[in-house]
């Protein structure tokens, strides 16, 4: 029997584009994935080819649809989720990108951000957007493109250009230029969107020197984004849900109520705790962000962002060549010497929350002649664990203590890593049966707009973890490890600020 409630989710990430077809219950019916090459043109610069972002997204979607149809499943709608903050500018007439996308990890606008902060911009940006002044966010990236591509700023003022994050770019391509839009979650990561008024902010646009005319229309996370252009798939599909990857993962993890928290471990690591309909301003350098906009209701979250998580393992594999596959790290970490003092601070792209130091760089401490791949693997995984604990400590200080953390993303499949999280964090860690919660969240948002779900929070009743990890580390040992970590982080920060 053909399942008319099957929904395709396109999940465009930093290192790959994938597409997954889900049924109404959240089970995976079909999937496909395409790798996305990284481009590193200079120290601290990270780019993607926008046409490759589009090609890999389209090919993965076609592959997932073909697999679903071979099983007798008909896709009813499409949801979209994406790497956030990555900036793209393109020609409205031709759809041609002006240059490569500037990826969220890119640090080329660090000096601009330092100048803005020195000029006193931080309080305004913080109050209006919930963000800090940092090259992580999209605004300075948009301005950099307009200022460094010949004639771009003048063309933007004439209305010839469009700008947006990856969701906007894909919506433009999926609809053949009929729709230039974004959702409130993605808009809230640009430094140009007032999360209180729910609109682009004229004062912020002036501050960052971004013309309003290039920006997309802001819509809901579950909303009508038009239909896919004729010829892309067997038939046009309605696009009914859009959310940034971390907010989509929170939906996929059924974090709908204040205090519920999730952490996604992909290229980076992102912890998010729901704060309901209240914009909670962090006093500990975490971010206030839109969790979702459903109809007229906007909910919010506090988020901590770590730039390097799985990318540290990828560096060990591709940069050092000491492991052949990421999955090796669990076994190697388990075999590491019990008394190893090796600590890795994986600040390959600066440090995010709660430190916000774009000039920081990675470092490994405590090596001896006995240090080998096993000890490095453990240090890489523990570096991500300790950064996560830094985030949860900041959340607790802001009045949102996390007692159970729901985890997802590629690293969550690693049992050693998941248990280490529980041990160092000192809280229960829950892993869902479907780790692709980012794509699942996009599908659920589209399903809500389609009418498959009456309300999103009805999904929570059916959300049960696949496994629960309880803390089992002695408190004295935990305190010692945390103390060593903090000392290493201070050393990295001291070098960056010297």
Image: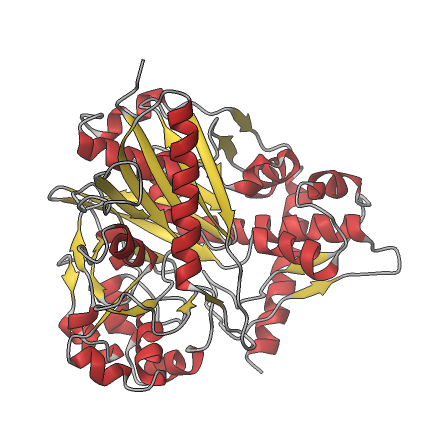
Locate the C terminus and report the quarter of the image it occupies: bottom right
Q: 355 or 171, which lies in front?
A: 171
Colouring scheme applied when the structure was drawn: secondary structure
Seen in the picture, residue 204 relative to 28 is either above or below; the reply is below
Residue at 82% x, 54% y: name it. Answer: 372
> Does residue 466 show up?
yes
Q: 208 or 363, which lies in front?
A: 208
Looking at this rendering, what residue extends furthest in the right direction?
369
In the shown orientation, is residue 232 left or right of residue 57?
Answer: left
Looking at this rendering, what residue extends furthest in the left direction?
296
**Number of residue marks:** 0
Q: 158 or 377, which lies in front?
A: 158
The percent coordinates of residue 320 (x first, y second) are 73, 60
In the shown orientation, is residue 224 left or right of residue 121?
Answer: left
The percent coordinates of residue 251 (x first, y second) are 32, 37
The percent coordinates of residue 33 (x first, y second) are 49, 42
Seen in the picture, residue 300 relative to 130 is either above or below; the reply is above
The percent coordinates of residue 390 (x first, y second) are 51, 54
> Does residue 398 show up?
no
Residue at 34% x, 67% y: name it. Answer: 88
In the shown orientation, is residue 422 left or right of residue 163?
Answer: right
Residue at 32% x, 84% y: name it. Answer: 147
Locate the N terminus and report the quarter of the image it occupies: top left
Seen in the picture, residue 206 relative to 388 is either above or below; the reply is below
């Amino acid at each position: 029997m053909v399942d008319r409630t099957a929904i395709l989710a396109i999940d465009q990430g930093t290192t790959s584009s994938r597409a997954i077809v889900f049924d109404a219950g959240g089970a995976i019916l079909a999937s496909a994935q395409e790798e996305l090459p990284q481009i590193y043109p200079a120290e601290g610069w990270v780019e993607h080819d926008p046409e490759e972002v589009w090609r890999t997204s389209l090919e993965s979607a076609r592959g997932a649809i073909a697999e679903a149809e071979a099983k007798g499943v008909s896709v009813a709608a499409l949801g979209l989720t994406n790497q956030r903050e990555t900036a793209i500018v393109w020609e409205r007439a031709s759809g041609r990108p002006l240059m490569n996308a500037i990826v969220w990890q890119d640090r080329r606008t660090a000096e601009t951000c330092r100048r803005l902060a020195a000029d006193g911009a931080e309080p305004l940006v913080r109050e209006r957007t919930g963000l800090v002044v940092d090259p992580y966010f999209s605004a300075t990236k948009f301005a950099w493109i307009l200022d460094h591509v010949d004639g771009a700023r003048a063309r933007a003022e004439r209305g010839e250009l469009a700008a947006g994050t990856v969701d906007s770019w894909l919506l433009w391509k999926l609809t053949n230029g009929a729709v230039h839009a974004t959702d409130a979650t993605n808009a809230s990561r640009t430094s140009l969107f007032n999360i209180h008024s729910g609109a682009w902010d004229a004062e912020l646009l002036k501050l960052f020197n971004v013309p309003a005319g290039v920006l997309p229309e802001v819509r809901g996370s579950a909303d009508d984004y038009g239909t896919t252009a004729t010829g892309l798939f067997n038939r046009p599909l309605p696009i009914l849900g859009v959310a940034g990857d971390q907010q989509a993962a929170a939906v996929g993890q059924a974090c709908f109520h204040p205090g519920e928290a999730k952490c996604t471990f992909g290229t980076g690591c992102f912890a998010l705790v729901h704060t309901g309909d209240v914009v909670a301003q962090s006093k500990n350098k975490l971010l206030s962000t839109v969790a979702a906009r459903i109809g007229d209701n906007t909910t919010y979250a506090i988020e901590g962002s770590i730039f390097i998580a799985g990318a540290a393992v990828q560096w060990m594999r591709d940069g050092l060549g000491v492991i052949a596959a990421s999955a090796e790290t669990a076994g190697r970490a388990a075999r590491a010497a019990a008394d190893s003092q090796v600590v890795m601070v994986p600040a390959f792209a600066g440090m995010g929350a709660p430190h916000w130091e774009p000039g920081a760089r990675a470092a490994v401490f405590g090596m001896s002649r006995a240090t080998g791949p096993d000890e490095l693997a453990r240090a890489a995984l523990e570096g991500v664990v300790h950064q996560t604990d830094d985030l949860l400590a900041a959340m607790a200080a802001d009045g949102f203590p996390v007692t159970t953390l729901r985890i997802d993303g590629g690293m969550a499949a690693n049992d050693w890593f998941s248990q280490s999280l529980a041990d160092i964090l000192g809280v229960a860690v829950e892993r869902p049966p479907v780790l692709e919660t980012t794509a699942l969240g996009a599908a659920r948002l589209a399903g809500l707009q389609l009418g498959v779900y009456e309300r999103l929070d009805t999904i929570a009743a059916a959300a049960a973890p696949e496994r629960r990890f309880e803390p089992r580390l002695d408190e004295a040992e935990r305190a010692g490890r945390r103390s060593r970590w903090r000392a290493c982080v201070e050393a990295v920060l001291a070098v960056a600020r010297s």
